[in-house]
Image (cartoon, rainbow, N blue to C red):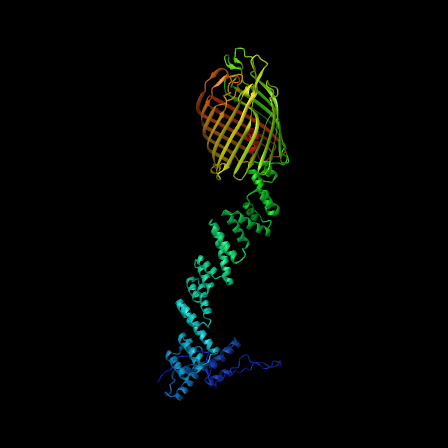
Amino acid sequence: MRWITGCCVSSFFILPVGQAQVITDYDTQSSALPSLQFSTQPDTTGIWFHIRQRQYALAEAEMVRLQQAHPQWQPASELREALAALSANTVERANNFQVAPDSPAATTETAAHLFGKLSQLSHAQQIAVAESTLALAANLASQANRVDYYIQVGWLYYQQQYYAKALQQFEQAQLIRANDKVRDGIQACIDGLVSDAAAQPDAERLAELVHRYPGYDITGAIEAIGWQAYNNQQYSVAYKRFAAADFVYGKVLALQQNGQSEQAQQLACENDNSPPLAIFCTDALASTQASEYAAEQYIASIQAAQHIAQRRALREGEQALLGWAYLAAGRPRSARSIFAQLLEDYPDDERYAQGLVSSLSSDQQRQQAARRYPGVAKLVRRGFADQAWQRKQFERARRLQNPAAVAILHPQRLAVYTGIDARSRSGEAGLGNFDVTHGYVAINEVTGPLQWQGQLDYEQLYSGIPDAGQWFGEGQTQDDFGSISGFEDTGIMANVKYEQQNHTLYGEIAYSLIDQPVAPRLTGQLGAAWFTDTATLAVTAYRQRVGDSLLSQGSTWFENSPQAWGGVHKNGARGLYSHLLTAQWALSLSGRIERYSGDKVIDNRHVSLRLDASQDIASNISVPLDYWRVGPYVSVEHFEHNASGFTRGHGGYFSPDMLLSVGLYSELLTQEGQPGQVKAALNVGYNAIRQAGYYRFPLTQNGDWTAAQTSAGISADLTLEGQYLLGNHWSIAGFATQSFAVAYRSTWAGIELRWHAGATKGLTSDTLIRNRSHSTGYAF
């Protein structure tokens, strides 16, 4: 005798013919009669009916239905006991089931009896059915070859999680007749097999299931358990499950979360024919574009943007970043196209305006862009204003509304000032010795882009009386010197400056020392300076007095004679080119070509050249400075004739055949726009000098021949100057310069008081006394 133990499945079973579910419901009576009272207890007649018919599954189902319909209902104890007794009796009878003799008729009867008993088991009873009972049921189903038996055994195996055996039963049923019940069973078994394979996880088994059952939704189940692992942050497991289902999007996300961003991006972009993967691909490329740009890998950033553009139109931020990458990679034309497109949609955006301006190579192009795009116009104007401030074009910076200039400079720019300075040069009395005292009153005004100045001068020139026996004029002096030792005189000077975007023009005219032995001549300067972002070029043509002596700067008389000589002027041009090599290093080249001439003085030619290399070390200093340049220099100059004597034909000015100087130069300037400002310069070098021999009277080449001379030694020049505000309308300025070389000393100092019509909050370096174009000789 074989014993059957356990229980089977519930809702998926097919009930044997002859059994029916009886449901009674007495709650449908009319409630139209208000006097009728109803019982609050449900009618349990149906449950008792199924108990008496020994139909446990139906009785349990009716119990569940009534409990759901009446949540407050508590079944009577006798009802619960009767239902429990039926359950125990049903299991016992199933366990005591005996197999009939082995004959076709007996087999059929046995199968009908067994499957009838199994169908009565509730869902709760099915989980205990023994494996031997399941094997018996499977054998009987195979002998009967009935679809309903195969299905019933299949669900029993399924409840026991014997998914492979359950699948065999459903596949046998499918061979007889395929219907939805069979297909549902197969799908459930496949889902179970998928769960088992995923628990390992066994990607090969999962892939085998997909291949073996192409007609069933296996991938959906695999994807579901893949998402389960993904949500549990088991990204490696999730990747294997998604791979088994060939679910590319899931694989991409799992790779991304597992820190394999590059692989995720590559996989998504290789399969970007679906919208989710296309979105992921382009988003990942956008992230790569940004990260490569941040890492200064501009070519890689450009390539990422190009890959995005192959799949969809670039978004605004991606397009802008591509433009900046083009700029950084040295491809301004490509950047120009990008930013121009952006400005068509956002004409006021200053960021894109900045990009377009940066991509343009000339001011003309920037001006054209400014006329088209308001954002560019605003940016260009602001850039020009900042540029003017940096180039020391302070009045233009104020007109262009540079914030620093507007903060300190009043629109009323009228200023009146007066000053005095004195210069002393060492030398023999009446010859090289020379003292000059200079006083002046001036007015400065601004009219539109023009800055003009008018000045009245008063000068005292003094040289002294030569010692007896000195060569002067026509011969050697006697005890009774028959010429002048000095004089005083007046003059007038006017200048104008015109500042534009990339250049500054300067013009000056003067008529000074009006009443002196040699008739005065007009002097002046005409200069221009041009600016680029990295270079400055300045050129000035001029006629100026030579200020080495009373003879050269003014003039004198021959002893005991009404005949005058001297008054030496230099006519020529000076130039300066400075190039910024890096943010701190610059290289400068300057030079002069001049012709010296005077009344009864030999004409002379002079050339000079100087090369400077400098480093701006201001950023390394804690004190706020505008600049501090330090570096070496080398200079050389040459005169055609030695005209340094004080006899007829000579001009009384230093004119070496060769002067070579090598040394160090340093110059600093404190910040612009402050109430006070200081500028200092130091030049220290080694000089090698050769002075050519000369005739005592060079015009006629008569007299003694003076032999050539050479000398060498240290030279130095130190200049200090400053200015300070005394309230909003007054300021004071001053300077001092000390120079020395071999057998030479010179001192120059001065002070100036200014009145400003408009309230002034800060000072700029163009008002330092020695820093004005009149003194520097250049338009900037």
**Which quarter of the rendering shows the N terminus?**
bottom left
Q: Is residue 355 above or below residue 506?
A: below
Q: Is residue 262 above or below residue 90?
A: above
Number of labels in the image equals 0
Furthest residue to the left? Answer: 1
**In the image, farthest residue toward the top:** 479
The residue drawn where x is 45% and y is 69% is: 219
* Quadrant assignment, res 108: bottom left
Residue depicted at x 56% and y 42% = 362
Q: Is residue 453 above or below residue 82?
A: above
Q: Position of residue 443 (x, y in %)?
A: 63, 29
Q: Is residue 75 visible?
A: no
Residue 152 point in image, percent of width and height: 44, 80
Compared to residue 115, the image places residue 399 above or below, namely above
Nearer-the-camera pick, 50 or 490: 490
Residue found 44% across the figure and 22% down from its top: 711
Q: Where residue 242 sits: x, y (%)?
A: 44, 65
Which of the 4 image quarters holds residue 161? bottom left
Residue 694 lies, in percent from the top left, at 48, 19
Question: Considering depth in this image, is 71 or 98 the residue closer to the camera?
Answer: 98
Instruction: Please state if 378 lies on the left or on the right of 226 as rendered.
Output: right
Residue 308 visible: yes
For the C terminus, the quadrant is top right
